[in-house]
């Protein structure tokens, strides 16, 4: 921190809330096999502490020559979509070497109507401390939706992950992170994250009326975080979405087709307020 602050008790630290505002975008990205593209814009508000959290996200899409895409139905495929998410974390210290983290969430991801948009997720993994600097993680996570459910491993190696000076890193899946604290106020960081979600399309959707779309992507970032004062942090990153796939389902959850989107660059700005 920029200045020495009174030490919070462990319980007060867990309960201390944070408000984060995100704004990001990705440049024109073509659909593989088609000379047609889409830009993506995202806004997000997120309030959380170490135990509980809530977020609302909105994506807006800017299409180019969409009428030549195979799923075009005479109107803009999708203008925007929304996601509401509630989650809870349960950290459990077993002994000096072993630590366990469990997390559950419920969410709704939808274009217009929220009905049949509900899903959930669970993550559970163990972390074993090899020594003061090195740890390994192993577990699993699952995303549930009535249309498509996935379960994948959580694996990782971490080095000085919770330190506030010098180099720290987490190498693994579904997230990789490398950071270097230049000074108490400035952190340089890079990373990669995998994400997956099922979107409930509108009743009059331009893709598949009353249908669904599963979106999967890998996204990398490179940027910095600046601690303005004890309450405010500002971060800015370059984004690179290097693998994006989406699959269309009808209202009966039958798969219709799948498409891939070519890589594209973008950027993100975050402003965080610590209460």
Image (tube, rainbow, N blue to C red):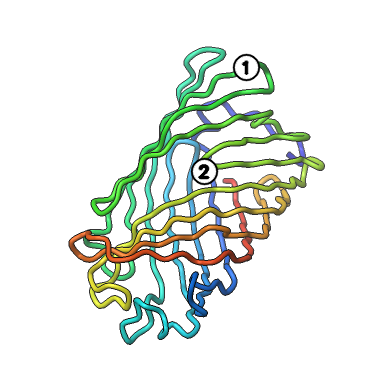
Give x and y (percent) for residue 67. 40, 85
Earlier residue among tags 1 and 2: 2
Judging depth in this view, the residue of 54 and 96 nearest the camera is: 96
Looking at the image, residue 215 sits to the left or right of residue 40; the answer is left
Is 4 on the left-hand or right-hand side of 39? right
Query: Circle 1: is it few (<14), some (14-19), or many (20+) Cα within 10 Å?
Result: few
From mark 1 to mark 2, how far is it between C-alphas? 31 Å
**Image location (x, y in percent) of residue 83:** 38, 59
Percent across and percent down for residue 112 are 30, 70
User: Residue 130, which numbered label?
Assistant: 1
Task: Out of 70 and 26, give the one closest to the viewer.
Answer: 70
Residue situated furthest front in the rendering = 33
Decide: few, some or many residues near mark 2? Use Cα within 10 Å; few <14, some 14-19, many ≥20: some
The residue beneath circle 2 is 17
Q: Residue at x 32, y 47 (%)?
A: 106
As displayed, is residue 121 above or below residue 27? above
């Amino acid at each position: 921190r920029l200045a020495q602050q009174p030490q919070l008790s462990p319980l007060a630290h867990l309960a201390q809330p944070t408000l984060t505002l995100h704004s990001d975008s990705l440049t024109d990205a073509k659909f593989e096999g088609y000379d047609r593209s889409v830009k993506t814009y995202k806004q997000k508000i997120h309030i959380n502490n170490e135990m509980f959290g809530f977020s609302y996200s909105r994506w807006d899409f800017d299409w180019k020559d969409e009428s030549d895409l195979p799923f075009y139905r005479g109107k803009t495929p999708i203008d925007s979509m929304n996601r509401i998410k509630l989650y809870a974390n349960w950290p459990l210290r077993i002994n000096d070497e072993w630590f366990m983290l469990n997390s559950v969430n419920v969410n709704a991801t939808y274009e217009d109507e929220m009905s049949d948009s509900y899903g959930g997720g669970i993550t559970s993994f163990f972390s074993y401390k090899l020594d003061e600097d090195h740890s390994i993680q192993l577990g699993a996570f699952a995303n549930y939706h009535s249309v498509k459910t996935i379960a994948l491993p959580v694996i990782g190696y971490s080095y000085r992950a919770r330190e506030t000076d010098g180099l720290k890193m987490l190498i693994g899946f579904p997230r990789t992170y490398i950071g270097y604290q230049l000074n108490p106020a400035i952190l340089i960081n890079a990373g990669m994250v995998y994400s997956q979600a099922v979107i409930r399309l509108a009743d009059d959707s331009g893709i598949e009326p009353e249908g669904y779309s599963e979106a999967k992507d890998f996204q990398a970032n490179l940027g910095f975080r600046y601690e303005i004062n004890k309450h405010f942090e500002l971060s800015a990153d370059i984004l690179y979405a290097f693998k994006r796939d989406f699959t269309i389902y009808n209202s009966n959850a039958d798969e219709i087709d799948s498409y891939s989107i070519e890589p594209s660059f973008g950027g993100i700005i975050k402003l965080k307020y610590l209460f």
